[in-house]
Amino acid sequence: MRYYLIAGEKSGDLHAANLMSELKKLDKEAHFRGWGGDKMCMQGLELVHHFRETSFMGFAEVFRNFFKIKKFLTECKRDILRYQPDVVILIDYAGFNLRIARFAKKAGFRVFYYISPKIWAWNTSRAYRIKKDVDKMFVIMHFEESFYEQFGIKVDYVGNPLFDAIRQYRPNPNFIQENGLDNRPIIALLPGSRVQEVQRMLPVMVEVAQDFPDYQFVVAGVREISADLYAYKNVKVIFDQTYDLLAHARAAIVTSGTATLETALFEVPQVVCYKMNFLTLIVGWLVLKTKYISLVNLIANKEVVKELLQWHANRKNICAELKAILTEKRHFILEDYKLIKAQIAIKESASERAAKLMWKYLHE
């Protein structure tokens, strides 16, 4: 079969690649084309555009790049028509993928959506578009089942692919030595996987290091981002070794996103921070439907980890919370992490489960 996949960021690239790996086990004639990243290419993707070119964060940036995004959408639609896939598989990346879903459905292609866009957080009316434009939705959060049920949409819960990735992870026993780290406890800094996130969050994270001389602060760098953005003297930067870093960390300061759940699954107490531009902030205030922004708190439906947003994400507040999670709050966070892990754990991997269901639906 011919599969057209679209992932627009680093985490989507990982999850799509794992899905492709499972689909190949079921379909020996599988051919993949689409938009994604290096991991998808390793699984045989015929790449149209890398997510480095297409990842835009926040309303202001989307507005500034309106014509570029429009051009990408037009190119993607034409490419789908040329390729004539048996199914279009969309991975998160709501702004782009929901538009492609509408086009693909009208053009007569089957449309599967793996990893729901976060429409339960804001603009819930998009559920009606999904009901109309998506044939099958495969979700990774338990609460998404009941959310979609309100709109008469039956979805398949497949488990969380992050749990799979971490379960398959094998630590590097020489991580400390190979990266020139010393014997002080490690505070991991995860400033995000997008340029804008790193620009906004890393400077204040680095400031915090000055108040904790007994710890070494180590940044989880992303090679797709220019090394110049990580050029700070008092922190160590390690590229593309996030899981090894978390496996050795005593605590972490994390930009809100997928990394918050990864940090929790590694049982590392964390402070969650996030900053956005003014336009995105105003729109967020108007449309945000959830009490929390981090996946950890959303899954637990309570504050497990502290969320410091906008001007609250400053050196003073981060330092105070970091001290707390290194001491009196540590035990309580770790106990809540255990409950979260139990909630999302399933025997079969999410990628395997999703692939089997897709294969089944494609043959019905």
Image (cartoon, rainbow, N blue to C red):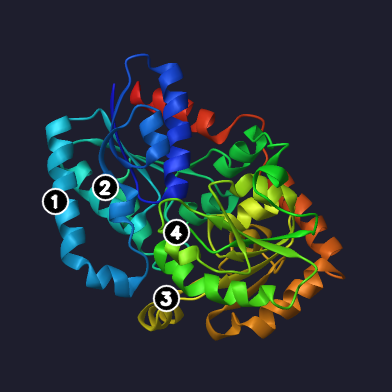
**Considering the image in quadrants, where does the C terminus appear?**
top left
Dots 2, 1 in contact, CB < 8 A: no
Dots 1, 4 in contact, CB < 8 A: no
Q: Mark 1 or mark 4: which is in front? A: 4
Around disc 1, counting alpha carbons within 10 Å, would you say few (fewer than 14), some (14 to 19), or many (20 or more)?
Answer: few
Residue on which the image places disc 2: 101
Around disc 2, counting alpha carbons within 10 Å, would you say few (fewer than 14), some (14 to 19), or many (20 or more)?
Answer: many
Q: Residue 204, percent across and down? A: 57, 77
Q: Residue 297, percent across and down? A: 65, 64
Say which amino acid is labelled 2. Ala
Badge 2 or badge 4: first in the primary sequence: 2
Residue 287 marker: 3
C-alpha span from label 2 to label 4:
35 Å
Q: Mark 2 or mark 4: which is in front? A: 4
Say which amino acid is labelled 4. Ala
Say which amino acid is labelled 1. Thr
Residue at the image position 17 percent from the left and 31 percent from the top: 83
User: In this view, which residue lies farthest toward the top?
Assistant: 28
Badge 3 or badge 1: first in the primary sequence: 1
Residue on which the image places disc 1: 74
Q: 39 or 359: nearer the eye?
A: 39
Secondary structure under badge 4?
helix
Q: Residue 277, percent across and down? A: 40, 79
Q: Residue 2, percent across and down? A: 26, 25
C-alpha span from label 1 to label 4:
32 Å
Secondary structure under badge 3?
helix
C-alpha span from label 2 to label 3:
23 Å
